[in-house]
Amino acid sequence: MVVSRWLQPEALVWGGRLVRDVALAIAADGTCDAAAVPPPGATVERLPGKLLLPGLVNAHSHAFQRLLRGRTQAPGAGRAQDDFWTWRETMYRVAEALDPDGLAIASRQSFLEMAHAGITTVGEFHYLHHAPDGRPYEDPLELALRVIAAAREVGLRIHLLRVGYARPGFNAPPETRQRRFYDSHPDLFLAAISALEQRVRADPLVTVGAAPHSVRAVPRSWLEAVARARPSTVHMHVAEQPREVEACLAEHGRRPVEFLHEIGLLDERFTAVHAVHLARQEVSLLGRSSVCACPLTERDLGDGILPADGLAAAGTSLCIGTDGQSEIDPFGELRALEGHLRLQRGRRLALPSTGEGPDALARTLLEIGTHGGARSLGLDVGRLAPRRPADLCAVDLGHPALLGAPDDALLATVVFSGPASAVTDTWVQGERVLRGGRHALDEDSAREFTALCRRTFA
């Protein structure tokens, strides 16, 4: 393997361990080669005061919902309180208003903020497929391709989770507000995934998976078709709201996870998103699968708290997502995953951790935010090791929030106290995406996104 350059930070997480006094060798093909002392005459970029981490993996995103930020924090007219279902009404109005250009602009701004926060891979749960009147665009894949193009313009790796949506709820007729989401038959949903895979196959940084939206939005026949088709990855919203659990019991006589187990979907390819309302027996059923926690969004919507400790004990692989983009802060997601459990359990250090020492829990959380997301998306990223893609981010240890970090608890300081603004640089497949806290698209994206907000909410 030919090494093209070296990055010399103050410290580096290599193979899951914090190491010092070495540099990261990046090969010409954009993969990691080694962590070692550079040889004489090597091309070395020195990064004093920086900690290099594997790039964060955002396993669940609705990029266009960045438009909602700050606009859903008061009850609507005539409502005494607000919840997920009333928030959804505002989301639908925004979804109905977006044309392809607007979707691309909103998505690009979300992806740009992700790059600034140290995220190098995004799993985009994409359910806007058709024109506002429900008719397909001339190119039926246009909206998915525009979202993918926005991520690639920013420089991110993207796993596009193409959503299947058949109905608004259990035994409910189609709704006008959701006509942009619908496929009329599971074969059309699966065919769209295959067609999208063909269109993006030339770009190694783009992959595609299946996302039957939820047990309320697709009937049993759809889920059976997905189980037979065996896509590379399957993501679903699962048990996000008590109403969903109650309706699933009424229609199928099973709770959502029990129902999915009965169909045969709960294997290593499956990711349950949210999963905050689980019965004890459902926790054990998810032991072979992944669960994607979105605690900042779940907190914003009042969804509930993921039983992450029980899931981890059952063998479930955990990961994180920014979901509704109320905040884009992967370290904040990891802190909330642990912090919500502390509040609920009434004790500290709630999640089980591997290893010992002051950094043990931080290493576990970082693994959730990197390798856990990669596993969920079926990608060989999330860890800096030989021949792995050089997807990484640099954290400024001189950031005011990180000053005085103890040497033996450096990762704990970053994970539990580091803001997204401490990230200064990101690389994807060895290519620089963010440099010194700046991205080439910052100004253009800010201008176009601000104008889009004015048009959308005029």
Image (spheres, rainbow, N blue to C red):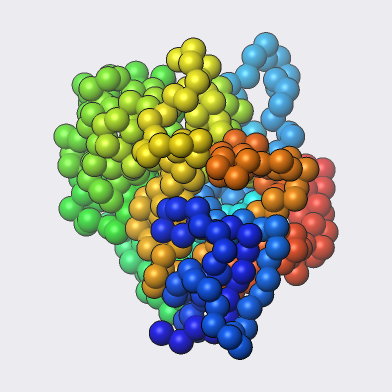
Picture residue at 41% right of the left edge, 65% below the top: 385
> Is residue 106 among what the camera can see?
no
For the C terminus, which image quadrant? top right
Picture residue at 24% right of the left edge, 41% below the top: 288
In-front residue for pair 45/240: 45
In-front residue for pair 120/265: 120
> Is residue 53 among what the camera can see?
yes
x, y percent for residue 122: 51, 55
x, y percent for residue 153: 63, 70
Picture residue at 36% right of the left edge, 38% below the top: 354
Picture residue at 51% right of the left edge, 50% below the top: 58
Q: Relative to 256, is 398 on the left or the right?
A: right
**Tag count:** 0
x, y percent for residue 454: 82, 48
x, y percent for residue 135: 50, 56
Instruction: Residue 438: name its quadrant.
Output: bottom right
In-front residue for pair 197/91: 197
Give the vertical position of 204 relative to 423 (above or below): below
Give the vertical position of 126 relative to 8 (above or below): above
Instruction: Residue 323: name its quadrant.
Output: top right
Q: Relative to 282, is 196 on the left or the right?
A: right
For the N terminus, which image quadrant? bottom left
